[in-house]
Amino acid sequence: MNTEQDRWSRVKGRLRSSVGEDVYTSWFARMDLESVQEESVHLSVPTTFLKSWIQAHYAERVLTCWQAEMPEVHRIDLTVRSCARHVAPAQEVIAPVVKTSHDTIPPGLRTDGRPAHELRATAIAPVAASHDAIGGSPLDPRLTFAGFVIGRSNTLAHAAARQVAEGRRGDVVMFNPLYIHAGVGLGKTHLLQAVAWAGNSGSERKVLYLTAEKFMYGFVAALKIQTALAFKEALRGIDVLIIDDLQFLQGKSTQAEFTHTLNALIDAGRQVVIAADRPPSDLESLDDRVRSRLAGGLVVEMGSLGEELRLGILKSRVAAARAHHASFDVPGPVLDYLARTITHNGRDLEGAINRLLAHSKLNNVSVTLELAEREVLDLIRPQEPKRIKIEDIQRVVARQYNVSRSDLLSSRRTANVVRPRQVAMYLAKTLTLRSLPEIGRRFGGRDHTTVLHAVRKIEALMSKDVALSEEIESLKRQLQE
Ligand code: ADP
Ligand code: MG
């Protein structure tokens, strides 16, 4: 791999350790290197929202990480790459724009002197007429049910999505909303878009797929200039509303509009499908009533991709690529190697196949284990530590001290609940990324100073009380298992 990409990998490594895995995956996972020119580095992200967020919050940090690798860098240019990044220049999406199929070239390979478009297949834009009435987000033609591989971690989510997709106009809606949550790259967008495609192709239902960003910037703005009546009229036309990445929904007025839309649609018996990176209870910026409405339908989590599922995804990617590049093949042992080592998410699996495809095409070589090992080195990451939830902490602590979870949340101040409560708050602070106010809220609406007091108290006790610190270590182990 060329040195620019090596550098970029190292910069990403620095960023990841500097901001932490969660922040990294939320904001930087989709950032790509476009080019490096003397004193400036050109990076790109897929959306305006990501761009402005990174600029507002992490500009310095990104620059510092670059300077650690290349002291001569003095400027970072961040741009939004088109959603159809290899097809058309960036544009505001009114009608659905469709991504190029199968051979999106990873940015890493666009720096080796050969223009990536040599490998591009022309996108065929399927008609999704109903989709653009209010301005849906673009749909990727690969993200259909046909291309979705089913495994243990996604069986339920897949079945629910299928059920929703097969509904007819006027059918009684079974679960509303359908709420799917999972970490980055585990197939949320794929499933949601599969529902959108199924609904758009030939069915009489109007399906609208929106990212939360699109909802914020497009939908709400459009609705605001209409009258309440026109708003209701527009809503009546939608049979299925799909919102992706709900965790990005921000701002009081947007949330009010979202709540309004959600209630109106559900009450009218229209289907709502939502994806987010966390369960409804953890959507901190939404108020309790919305959270409980979201939790009131069917909430399904998709777990991490097992090895078998990873292998299935790799195979389906190779098959898809072969439709356009018949000579491309990835031998079984290479697939096994990739499935075994790239454990993190589906995006990396896709990236690995893209790289092998680009490499074998550009250099006219066949794919070997050696090539694969070299090309995907940076996609192999150490296993991410388990995401621990506050509820789990409360449950484990309650069990350990033989109190109930509601005791922990209650206002009771007897010694037998005060100490376990403090231990649980301490664990919440040390094992999760939640803020003190958030932890306070999740412990029966306590003030953040109470949480801070608990954390300090337990720290102080642990330094002298060996039994307590062993107890806490054991709790941590139980939670991390
Ligand atoms: P998310 O929206 O959860 O971050 P995506 O839906 O964008 O994840 O998935 C990331 C990549 O992994 C996509 O290329 C997607 O097609 C692929 N992928 C994830 N899960 C599956 C699956 N079960 N079958 C086929 N491809 C999958
Ligand atoms: Mg997604």
Image (cartoon, helix red, strand yellow):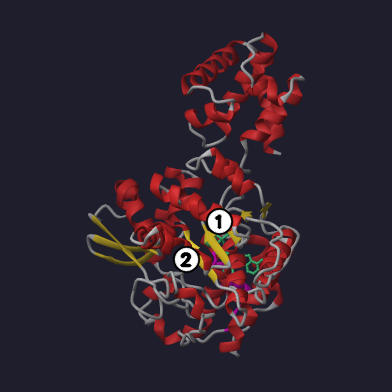
Q: Up-down: is 417 above or below 230?
A: above
Q: Residue at the location (56% across, 58% down)?
A: 265
Compared across the picture, whether 185 is left or right of 75 comes to right
Along the horizontal axis of the image, is 345 left or right of 31? right
Q: Residue 214: x, y in percent? A: 42, 62
The N terminus, quarter of image: bottom left
Image coordinates for residue 18, horizontal then vertical, percent: 42, 43
Question: Ligand 1: does it lie within 8 Å of the C-beta at label 1?
Answer: yes
**Which tag, 1 or 2, sits closer to the chain's start?**
1
Q: What residue appears at the point 46 percent right and 45 percent down from the top-left corner?
A: 17
Q: Which residue is mark 1?
A: 184
Instruction: Work out which quarter of the rendered image holds the C terminus and state it.
Output: top right
Q: Which residue is mark 2?
A: 233
Instruction: Give the dominant element type of the magenta stretch: helix, strand or loop.
Output: helix
Disc sitting over residue 311 in the figure: none
Residue 7 is situated, as x and y percent measured from the top left of the image, at 39, 59
| Image quarter for ligand 1 | bottom right
